[in-house]
Every structure is written in C-alpha cells, then in structure tokens.
Image: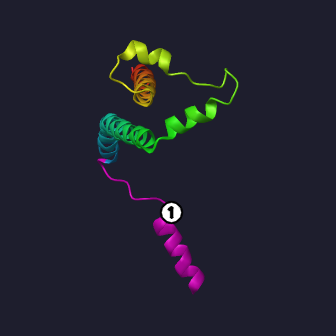
Amino acid sequence: MAELFEARLDKMFAEPPAFEDAGVFAGDVQSKLNRNWATRRLVIGALGGIGGLIGVGQIVSSGVVGHMKSLAQGAPSLASFDLSHWHGRLGAGLSPATSGAMWLGLAAIGIALALALSRLIEDL
C-alpha cells in the first residue's frame, strides 16, 4: 500500500504544473533582477568606500603610521618610508601621517574607479 501511495506522489510531483504565463513571468523576474543589479553594485561600492574611509581614519588615529616610521628608521633605506619628500609638495599644514593617509585614500579611490570602469565596459 505504501508503494502505491509513493508512486502516486512521485507521479504528482515529478514535474511542476505548467502555467500559461510562465515565460512572461520568468522574463519579468529576470528583467527585475538585471535592473536592480546595477543599484546593488552602486550601494555595495559606496558602503565599501565608506567602510574603507573609516578604516583609514582608525589607522591614522591609532598612531600606527608613526610607529611604522619609527620601526623603519632602523631598517635599510629601501624599507624606510620617507613622507617628508611628499610633505613639502602637499603643503606645510599636513603632518606626515595625514599626508600618508591621503595618498592611501587617493590610491583606494583610483582602484575603485578602475574597477567601476571595468564593470561598466563589461556590461556594455
């Protein structure tokens, strides 16, 4: 008796029922997913950028850059990171840690723009 019941269940649920508007429904869902994907990318990118700025701010405020510079003074000249050269070009009001954070932020923005441009070209 159980085998007969299971056979009936298998037959009833083997294939989903076909609806008349299945193709239209699938097209509508696919178009909504494609349309919202650009918005998702924009929101994820913006939130990632904000998170990156918060992270850079935390690193700068914790004094890690100054500590790394003091550690690098004992290292060979290739390992040292001299920000005083860039400090003169940026202006007298910026500290070396602030100018380093600014360069790091500019590099992150450049990478983000390159990725956004490659995604845009990929979608075209």
Q: Nearer the viewer, residue 68 or 118?
A: 68
Work out which residue is located at the far bottom of the displayed protein and give it.
Answer: 1
Q: Residues within 10 Å of mark 1 (few under 14, many from 20)?
A: few
Q: Is residue 91 left or right of residue 73?
A: left
Q: Residue at x 54, y 39 (%)?
A: 67
Q: Is residue 10 magenta?
A: yes
Give the vertical position of 3 relative to 11 (above or below).
Answer: below
Q: Which residues are magenta?
A: 1-21
Q: Secondary structure at mark 1?
A: loop
Query: Image quadrant of residue 28?
Result: top left
- Measured as percent of width and height from the top left, residue 66 is found at 50, 35
Q: Quadrant of the N terminus?
A: bottom right
Q: Nearer the viewer, residue 11 or 76?
A: 76
Q: Nearer the viewer, residue 107 or 26?
A: 107
- Measured as percent of width and height from the top left, residue 31 is found at 31, 37
Query: Image quadrant of residue 79?
Result: top right
Inspect the image, locate mark 1, and give the three-letter code of the amino acid beneath it. Ala
Q: Which residue position holds label 1? A: 14
Q: Residue at x 32, y 22 (%)?
A: 93
Q: Nearer the viewer, residue 46 or 22?
A: 46
- Measured as percent of width and height from the top left, residue 37 is found at 35, 37
Work out which residue is located at the far top of the displayed protein and give it.
Answer: 89
- Measured as percent of width and height from the top left, residue 124 is found at 39, 20
Q: Residue at x 43, y 59 (%)?
A: 16
